[in-house]
Image (cartoon, rainbow, N blue to C red):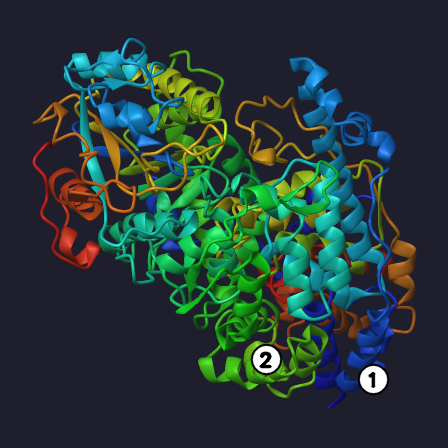
Amino acid sequence: MVASNALHNQHLLWRSGFGPQAEDISLIYATNSKQLFKKIYAASSAAPSPLLVSESVFPLTVKVIQNLSSYAKMDREERSKLLQESRDAIKKLNLLWLNEMTHSQAQLREKMAFFWHGHFATRENNIIYQQQLLEIIRRDGLSDFGTLLRGVSKSASMLAFLNNQQNRKSHPNENFAREVMELFTIGRGNYTEQDVKESARAFTGWGFKVNGEFVSRPNFHDAGTKIIFGKTGNFTGDDVINMLLEKKETAFFITQKILKNFVNDSVSTEEVHRFSDKFYQSGYKIDALMEDIFTSSWFYEKKNIGVKIKSPIELIVGIRRFLPIEFENEEVQLLYQRLLGQVLFYPPNVAGWPGGKSWIDSSTLMYRLKIPRMLHDNSDDATAPKQDDDVMMGQMEEKRKRNVAGKVNVTINWKAVLSRFDNTSRHQLPEKLVKEVLLSGNADISKMTAFADSSSKSAYIQTAIIALMSTPEYQLM
Amino acid sequence: MYIKRRDFIQIGSLATSTLLVPNFLKAFEQPKMLPPGNKVVVVIQFSGGNDGLNTVIPYRNDVYYRERPGLGIKRQDALRLNDDAGLHPALTHLKDLHDNGNLAILNNVGYPNPDRSHFRSMDIWQSASASNEIVQSGWLGRYLDAMCHGCDKPTQALELDDTLSLALKGEQSNGLAFKSARNLYGSSQEKFFREISASHQHHEESPVDYLYKTMAETISSADYIFKQSKLHPTNKQYPNSQLGQSLKTIASLIFSEINTKVYYVSLGSFDTHIQQESKQKRLFEELNDALKSFTEDLSENHRMEDVLVFSFSEFGRRVAQNASGGTDHGTANNMFFINGNLKQKGFLNEMPDLNNLQDGDLQHSVDFKSVYATILKNWLGVDDKKILNGNFKPLSFI
């Protein structure tokens, strides 16, 4: 029973957050998952403080926001500098958030924000707009979906990404209206092309000021009569969002995506309905939905444990939570993200990252398996891909020099890790290590630990952990 | 504290694990050379929805200039192909290919009930599904399934990219994605990986087995690809662009007679809602320069007849320009085919009918699945109906 408790707790920590932190390990054995979830839930109840990159990093951006006309005076070179400083600032924001995911006690909040980051996916090179959107999904990610949807829909990042700034009465641009339906709310098959065209008219005039503030511009708004979902009226963008929230399909679509992301890549319609009906009736309360999921017996069924392939971010943060790591050059983590196919703030498209098996191809798998040892070896591993792989930024024209992250230069605080095993006898070590690193009830212990260095207890623990993290099994949660 | 590489090598029980090397690894020790005349396909995906009307320009069409008062490409700027149409000014090498009879252009390619969302329409193209059905495998992946049943070799379809597109994901087999043969080989060399891979006992279809299978295939394929890439590396100068370097790798592999039948590369993003003119021009310059080196390289090595290059995009764009110096998502589009032995050259069909639009969009006259059927049946010589799960009339240009 204790063993299964520990496994359930591990499962919960990986799914509701980014895996166990050093301090959580004792907890795994000492509590049951209901109590553990209460703790997790409470830790995420407070509103988070926003993650902000120092404005000194992007002086040109600040200048343009304070005085838009300064942009007109900029020459080509200065404009390209403006873009570059903003991109560099977004990298800093990326690392800031990665650290927050690693160290924050509000694991559920950060995990939820990470989910919304893929759901409300934007690629915008403006640091201010990205910070604003991140604040929305971190602040409202556990509130109610309506509040979140309205916030995101009126964010500069989303409006810019989906071209609604250009959506005007004289020339409707459907991009925003289409994605709001297809990807953010009711999903495909629940609307017609006519609904998209008419909704685009309702959203005409929605835009933003240079500082990112939402603005509804009456001059560009088409106030005429529209027919949307069979209803006739001179609807506004807010009306369309309300109509979408009234539809049960939205609750189903969002619940299904959450279950697939947090529980299992394949869920049945019945399983979705079990949660989505209540979600709808609650007025889309996200925290209540998550509580429902994480306290259900279904969540702890064997078929749902250890079956999700970690996303690159979950992998990186998970390693960092288990092994306290100090980076001399934090940007090495951007390289990992790039090579593994998930760079925060740079989703492949508006649909976000597809996830599941799509994370794994030959090259990403092999790189995943190498990361733990590159961190531990602290060496400039000759096989580390640092050539031409410029997948970053989506800027084809940009010729990046060799990656800054040639050297790893990390320090793992092994002392903290080793002390956890002070009271573990030598013969118990293999099983305990496998259990704590791998979240797997039936891993082949002899194979996993056969590669460890058994010249001393500390060497054994270190090499066994690194070896275990370098396995296909560790890719699963 | 360092872990030395040898610490990862098991001292005891797994020392004999070389005995467990799967059979297909050994098969690669004597790679079978394919006879000259091995036909291969190079797919160039224009990601983001390329504007076909500013690619092949209908410069005698008044509607075109009326709908695109700012964005239309002037007749004198287009590269003349015939009285009715010219190419985008950046595509100088494609004009040369055309004039030499090595280029075919198919207009109005699409599918019924077109979807204007990028990822959906790309999925439709890559999976070869109908507009209203979801298919989780790609057409080239299913080609692998058909060709490569039980052969454990993902090298028959290679994508030059960091991740594998849906197009190359089959129901049983996957293609293999890499950008550099050397890096791929390097990362698969570790004894630790080779040994845990070899010692894995396959139990059942589960996520971890999927991972182990991918690992074993990677190790064997990496050896094979790297070996092949060094046999006859091209000496030709290629542009330093991503596409240029990818085509350079592909050329070296083609000359090596590796068993690869399909190469896949992407270029983008062509999603030109705004600032279309500069964006499309930049991408076409990259395309043009890379294709110039590639086709010259093929010609110099007498392989133009064996290689079919074709391009596609998930959709074309609206006929009318939008208010932002760009175009919105549209429908039907044109495709390029490059080969040294085309049965039909130049324009394969009629230009788009700009007087017969549907909701402001072009109507397709050729289903893209017919193009796939042509390539599968006439070029790769396989049963197209099974792979496409339907009967699509092949064309006759190859």
Asked whether residue A125 appears in the rendered view, the answer is yes
**Which of the marked residues, 2 or 1, is nearer the chain's N terminus?**
1
Residue situated in front as seen by the camera: B239 or B39: B239
Q: Relative to B341, does residue A249 appear above or below in the rendering?
A: below
Q: Which residue: 80% across, 77% down?
A: A28
Residue sticking out furthest to the bottom = A1
Name the residue tied to disc 2. Answer: A280
Residue at (39% x, 50% y) in the render = B166
Disc 2/disc 1 C-alpha distance (Å): 32 Å
Q: Residues within 10 Å of mark 1 (few under 14, many from 20)?
A: some
| Local SS, label 2 | helix
Please check whether the numbered discs 2 and 1 fall on a single chain: yes
Residue at (44%, 42%) from the top-left corner? B177
State the image coordinates of residue B246 (x, y, percent, origin top left). 42, 27
Quadrant where the N terminus of chain B is found in the figure: top right
What percent of the width, then of the height, locates residue A326? 86, 45
Find residue A91 and name its label. none
Q: Nearer the viewer, residue B6 or B354?
A: B354
Q: Quadrant of residue A288?
A: bottom right
Would you say B395 lies left or right of A168 here?
A: left
Q: Is residue A370 above or below residue A459?
A: above
Badge 2 amino acid:
Tyr
The residue wearing badge 1 is: A31
Give the number of callouts: 2
